[in-house]
Image (spheres, rainbow, N blue to C red):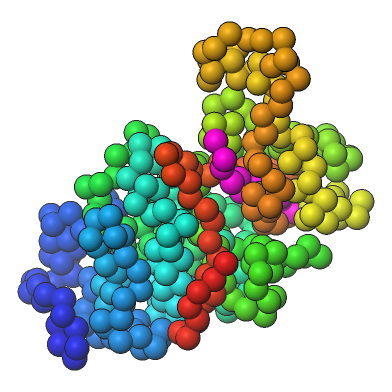
Amino acid sequence: MSQGLVSDTIECEGPEDAVETFFQKGWTDGLPVIPPTEGKVLKFLGAAGLAPDEILGAIPERNRIFTAEKVAVNAVMAGCLPEYFPVVVAAVRGISRPEFGLHGVSASTAGAGILMVVNGPVSKELGINSGQNLMAPGNRANATIGRAVRLVLYNLGGREFDRSTLGHPGKYTFCISEQESRWEPLHVLRGLTKETSAVTLFAAEGPNQVQNHSALKPENILNTIADRMRSLGSFNMGGDVECAVIICPEHYETLNRAGWTKKDVRKHLFEKACRPLADLKRGGLNETPVLPEDEKTMVRAVSSPDQILLIMAGGVAGRFSACMSGWFSRHMSRAVTEPIGPSCAGGT
């Protein structure tokens, strides 16, 4: 490639040959990719106002850097449109921040995916899905933006470091948007203005669907979610870990009619998502003897209400919400929120 691009040029007989070449070289996620031509890569860089050699992030533990050119190459491969690229750029910047702990997240046996939650005007502008089939196939923006970030990790961060035991489908792509409602958006609760477009990155285990079609009271809906959050096998019962909770529209309507705010919901979940230390011991998570005081010593799923990332999204029909444990090992990963835009840098 030329015009300031440093990537090698590969001559192929045609598009099909190019796709097969990428398979053979191990540059895909197991699905076909779009061949990243020079013209396409330059369009992406132009859409984000970036020079090819600008460094967007890194994994210092591996001596790997993410330049704008290489990230653009992977975004093209993922099937993104040029206008999606600023979201990808913000995501790469976000996951490269020290508090996210990208090396551990992407190398651990736990196999976390990177949940991306897009807020602000860009969500509607790009048509990022926040409704029906929220985390399912069918929307180009959701599918390709999330896929681009995964390809960046594989091709630039080094897929050979991934030691996931099981993984989960969110490691292909895991990008959603939050619906507008009377609740404060996620990015506003995390310190940005409503008019700012932003993406929140969270190292998430697979989604746990929570159904409650019976409850008419907010407390009972939330008690069902809290019970899933405090399950013995959850990462949230094993350490100081955040949790993402998606409230579906039908559950939201019940909560909103009763005047419950996001603050109220997070407080209730914090208080109810707990269980006695004795349960953890009897369940085998702590194999020391059960002491009398263990019945009253409570272990919480999160250490504060602020550790719950509360998102309102999903289809209008069906009382199905979800929760997702965060990732931890010897070190913790914290969710980060990054503004979207060519001139934006630094988030919360």
Quick check: can you spot residue 282? Answer: yes
Q: Nearer the viewer, residue 264 or 14?
A: 264
Give the x, y percent position of residue 280: 60, 19
**Magenta stretch encompasses residue 170:** no
Q: Quadrant of the C terminus?
A: bottom right
Q: Residue drawn 29% across and 39% down?
A: 163
Q: In front here: 18 or 71? A: 71
Compared to residue 119, the image places residue 251 above or below, namely: above
Q: Which residue is located at x 30 percent, y 87 percent?
A: 51
Q: Is residue 244 magenta?
A: yes
Residue in the picture at 23% in, 61% down:
63
Position in image of residue 275 (x %, y %): 70, 25
Image quadrant holding the N terminus, namely bottom left
Question: Which of the 4 image quadrants contains residue 257?
Answer: bottom right
- Magenta stretch, residue numbers: 239-250
Q: Is residue 118 left or right of residue 86?
A: right
Residue 115 visible, this orientation: no
Q: Position of residue 175 (x, y in %)?
A: 50, 59
Does 287 sit above or below residue 252? above
**Residue at the extreme bottom of the image, as rendered:** 3
Left or right of 81? Residue 184 is right
Residue 50, quarter of picture: bottom left
